[in-house]
Amino acid sequence: MSRSAAVFAMVAAALCAVPFVAPGYKTSLATEMLIFAVLAMSIDVLAGYAGRTSLGHGAIFGIGAYVVLYHVTVTGGRPWAGAALGLLAATAAAVVFALLAIRTSGVYFLLITLALGMIVWGICLRWTSVTGGENGLRGSVRPDWVAGPVPFYYFVLAATALMSFALWRFVHSPFGLTLRGIRESESRMRALGYDVSLHLFVGFVVSGFFAGAAGVLYAFFNSFASPATVALDQSVAGLLMVLVGGAGTLVGSFVGSVAIISLENFVSYHTERWPMVLGLVFIATMIFAPEGLVGRARLVLARRPGRSA
Amino acid sequence: MNRRSFLKTAGTSLLAMSSWTRRAFAADRGPIRIGLLSPLTGVIAAGGRELVDGFNLYWEQIGRKAGGREIEVVVEDDASNPNTALQKARRLVEQRDVHMLVGDILANTGLAVAEYVKGNGVPYFIPVIAADDLTQRKRIPNVIRIAGYSTSQSTRPLADYALKKGVRKVITVSQDYTFGHEQCGGFCQIFTEGGGSVLQQFWHPLNTPDFSPYLPQIQSAQPDAVFAMETGADGSRFIQQWANFGLKDKIQLFTSMNATDQSIIRTLGPEAEGVISAGHFCEGRDDPANKKFVSDYEKAFGKLPSIYAFSHYSGAMWLAEAFKAVGGKVEDRPRFLEAVRKVKLSSSPLGREVSLDKYGNPIYDIYIRKVVRRLDGKLWNSPVEVYPAVSQFWRYDPEQYMKQPSYSREFQGIKKA
């Protein structure tokens, strides 16, 4: 325990030191990584713990971002009220998504969430008078006291820490255990007297809430939302982060987000064929570490002689 | 030594010294770094490549030096995605320390970057981003449309030309996004104010594979002409299907300049011949600067230049003029931006002397262009008529004009008969 506490303290210290050792652009990159880690974690709750892979979370994330921007830039509201409304809207969308999707599993779940996400994308694209259509919504929506990049980084760091703790508690609670039970065998859980649909519903809504929270942070960060923010790409990016990092670990979301965003940035710096390099990395991950980087590391550590006890 | 000769020698030595120090200063100021954002991947990657080629071609031609400083162009891929564009803009400014940003093709990427530079004052130049409001209702002082155009600027002369040719009834077909709304808006407003009527407007999503739902409706409505606003692959598909449906010789087709841009017609055959459009670039125009640019580009890259290459080539020229005017001191932003606004560009492929109006949009000659075959058989746009000195406000009073709403699917400026 003391060992993991030490690791935890080191990671926390490293995260706090980011604006000092990597100022400027790298800090904003780190901010983006944290925000996407939250999105990835929200997907991991369903994909890793409940065994339901969603392709609709990018849309929920985007709804959060759109609502904040709409509230602040179009109706002239306050950022915090916008954030609250964004969370509310994203959660409401998650409720609708959940009601339609929870009765399915496997590839059907994937397809239904994909379709729901596409509907949101279509609305954002076509409802020009509200969403700005293809051009999207723009404007600075960040509250004044976190306006600078460094205070904003710490704000996102604090929010991420809080949300990670909440999600960690959530998946390790008895309720979280029932989600894992559902992943292993839905029929057995039902036979044991659990209301599987209700549990999945709650799991989905909670996960959607956090995806929305990431979206709100993203609106603060980016000052901009467009159909690309709610598009399938966003859901896929989140899911890839989960898979690269390791599904069902939560920590993997951070690893995946850091790995993918830094790859995107550093590879595109050297070649315009960066999407190809990224593709090769995904293929390599699936072949050599199908359980993700964190999952793989755990396996390797567990196999090390002398630690098997 | 009398007083006069003392003054003379003192004066000349002072001058010599100051020019020496200035040169020494220039030497350790390092190069002028230009961040060039371009969609090298994604839906409009082909255009992105040409954008970079056009921009670099000019700097190569003048030895990568202007205003006494080296020019360094740092290229970043915006992936045709506004979120990526924003990320890359941040990186160019915050990590690569560029003095200014240039580029982007898709309106949404440009608008995202414009929002970012609004906050930090970095100069951002947009030779292709055409959204009307960037130089009208929502101006940002450090976003300047060098060698660019505003969307509805070129379709107004086209409508005027159509009226003159006796066209009275049109149907518009357009991609359903702001760029399309604004092009059609400019066309419809002038056309209806001049006594024409718009029978119907079709809005289709981007990347429409099949226009057969629209073409028979057009045929049965029997308009005198059709105005089609298409970019990218939609443009070539529309022109092909228009011919395949047998409408080519029955109804006159007018298009936006993007639909008959080289990026599209270089892949087309006889079906594109005779299509009429309006634009400030016309590769078949007989003018020394224009001919030189077209032949230089063709020599370097083996194809005729597109609007993206043209705009960024001229944009580079524009910047070089401004660099000269401030002696390479681009760090002094207010002065540099003022110099960019003051540039009067002559002997460029844009035609006769071009300058910005006081809202930051260039005033150009607009050419009514027709797709014809060049002697060697290649298709190109050749001028049939010219509208001199067209501003983004056409003949309206700017302040009066900006009181009307921006063009959208709902507001097309159509005057009811």
Image (cartoon, coloured by chain):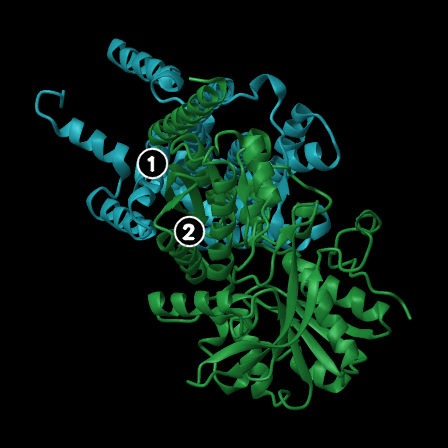
As displayed, is residue B161 above or below residue B77?
Answer: below
Q: Quadrant of the N terminus of chain A?
A: top left
Which colour represents chain A?
Answer: cyan
Q: Which residue shows up at 47% across the image and 36% down it?
A: B327
Q: Residues within 10 Å of mark 1 (few under 14, many from 20)?
A: some
Q: Position of residue A80 (x, y in %)?
A: 65, 24
Q: Position of residue B59 (x, y in %)?
A: 39, 51
Q: Say which of B145 and B289 sits in front.
A: B289
Q: Which residue is mark 2?
A: A106
How many discs mark residues in the rendered view?
2
Which label belongs to residue A262? 1
Tell me which label, 2 or 1, sits earlier in the chain: 2
Q: Position of residue A182 (x, y in %)?
A: 42, 39
Q: Does residue A275 appear to the left or right of A110 in the view shown?
A: left
Does residue A213 appear in the picture of this structure?
no
Q: Does residue A295 appear to the left or right of A176 in the view shown?
A: left
Q: Residues within 10 Å of mark 2 (few under 14, many from 20)?
A: few
- The residues tagged by marks 2 and 1 sit, at their Cα atoms, a distance apart of 31 Å
Q: Chain letter for green, please.
A: B
Residue type at mark 2: give it: Gly
Q: Quadrant of the C terminus of chain A?
A: top left
Which label belongs to residue B242? none
Chain of the residue on which disc 2 is drawn: A
Residue type at mark 1: give it: Ser
Q: Which residue shows up at 36% across the image and 36% down it?
A: B31
